[in-house]
Image (tube, helix red, strand yellow):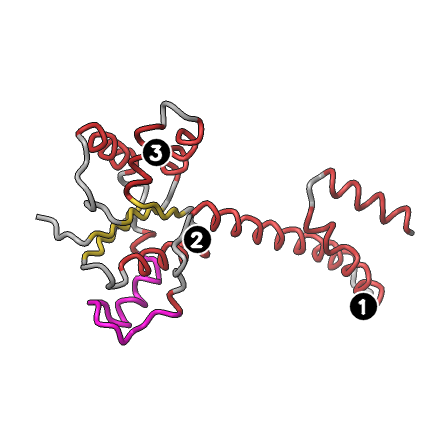
């Protein structure tokens, strides 16, 4: 039995079935006690592997998103005076606007929760399976300037282009050089109608 189990484990590792490898001892013990049908046992193996892959995928996308420290909207302070009601927040968290590729513009002075709200909606989108990224304006400009120079920036630019939701935090915080402005416009133009944006700023558009 141990030899057979070792072979199964080795073959599962070779096939990169890490979820099955981790849960196999528990699943075998459950099978001994519960005596499921062959199909139910096989389904349990697939369920374990799928759950592991979904967990790893979520962790990978969360890491890639670069969310701000505070991003859980379940902790949102509805008593704060910041221009958004509880009902409005609930509607935003349904992500219908994201399904329809609409954009959000969050405007207000510092300390009103724009970054928290944007990060929270980005977090909600990731949990729902979207590819969502949170980036400060200066980080995006750095990527645009160096995408043809460094491999790291080239990869980051490709990630930006593949995003279904892109949060740009603190846009208009500082004036842009002409080259950077053109690069930002080109990026937004490439993402138009395929990506939703959340833009935060403390300056009212004129």
**Residue under circle 1?**
34
Residue 86: image quadrant is bottom left
Q: Which residue is found at the position 79% from the left and 46% from the top?
A: 9
Q: Nearer the viewer, mark 2 or mark 1?
A: 2
Q: Is residue 154 left or right of residue 32?
A: left
Q: Which of marks 2 and 3 precedes in the sequence? A: 2
At x 80%, y 42%, the residue is 10
Q: Residues within 10 Å of mark 1 (few under 14, many from 20)?
A: few
Disc 2 residue crowd, few under 14, some 14–19, many 20+, Cα 10 Å: many
Label 3, label 2: how many angstroms apart (C-alpha)?
A: 22 Å
Location of mark 3 (residue): 143
Cβ–Cβ under 8 Å for marks 2 and 1: no
Q: Tell me the CA gap for discs 2 and 1.
A: 37 Å
Secondary structure beneath label 2: helix
**Where 158 falls versus 135 (above or below)?**
above
- Cα distance, mark 3 to mark 1? 55 Å
- Of the two numbered discs 3 and 1 in the rendering, the one whose residue sits closer to the viewer: 3
SS label for mark 3: helix
| SS at mark 1 in the image | helix
Q: Earlier in the sequence, mark 2 or mark 1?
A: 1
Relative side of 22 to 66, left or right: right
Spot occupied by residue 14 in the image (x, y as percentages of width and height): 74, 38
User: Considering depth in this image, is 176 or 105 the residue closer to the camera?
Assistant: 176
Q: Quadrant of residue 114?
A: bottom left
Q: Which residue is mark 2?
A: 126
3 or 1: tag closer to the N-terminus? 1
- Inspect the magenta stretch and tell me whether residue 79 lies in it: yes
Q: Residue 171, image x and y in percent?
A: 23, 46
Magenta region:
75-96
């Amino acid at each position: 039995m141990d030899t057979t189990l070792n072979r199964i484990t080795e073959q599962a590792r070779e096939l990169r079935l890490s979820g099955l490898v981790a849960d196999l001892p528990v699943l075998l013990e459950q099978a001994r006690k519960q005596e499921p049908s062959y199909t139910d046992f096989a389904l349990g193996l697939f369920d374990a592997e799928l759950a592991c892959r979904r967990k790893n995928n979520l962790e990978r996308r969360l890491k890639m998103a670069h969310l701000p420290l505070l991003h859980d909207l379940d902790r949102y302070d509805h008593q704060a005076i910041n221009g958004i009601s509880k009902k409005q927040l609930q509607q935003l968290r349904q992500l219908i606007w994201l399904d329809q590729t609409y954009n959000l513009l969050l405007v207000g002075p510092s300390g009103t929760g724009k970054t928290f709200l944007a990060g929270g909606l980005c977090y909600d989108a990731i949990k729902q399976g979207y590819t969502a990224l949170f980036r400060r304006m200066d980080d995006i400009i750095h990527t645009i300037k160096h995408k043809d120079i460094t491999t790291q920036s080239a990869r980051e630019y490709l990630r930006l282009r593949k995003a279904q939701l892109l949060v740009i935090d603190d846009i208009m915080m500082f004036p842009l050089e002409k080259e950077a402005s053109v690069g930002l416009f080109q990026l937004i133009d490439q993402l138009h109608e395929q990506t939703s944006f959340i833009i935060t700023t403390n300056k009212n558009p004129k």
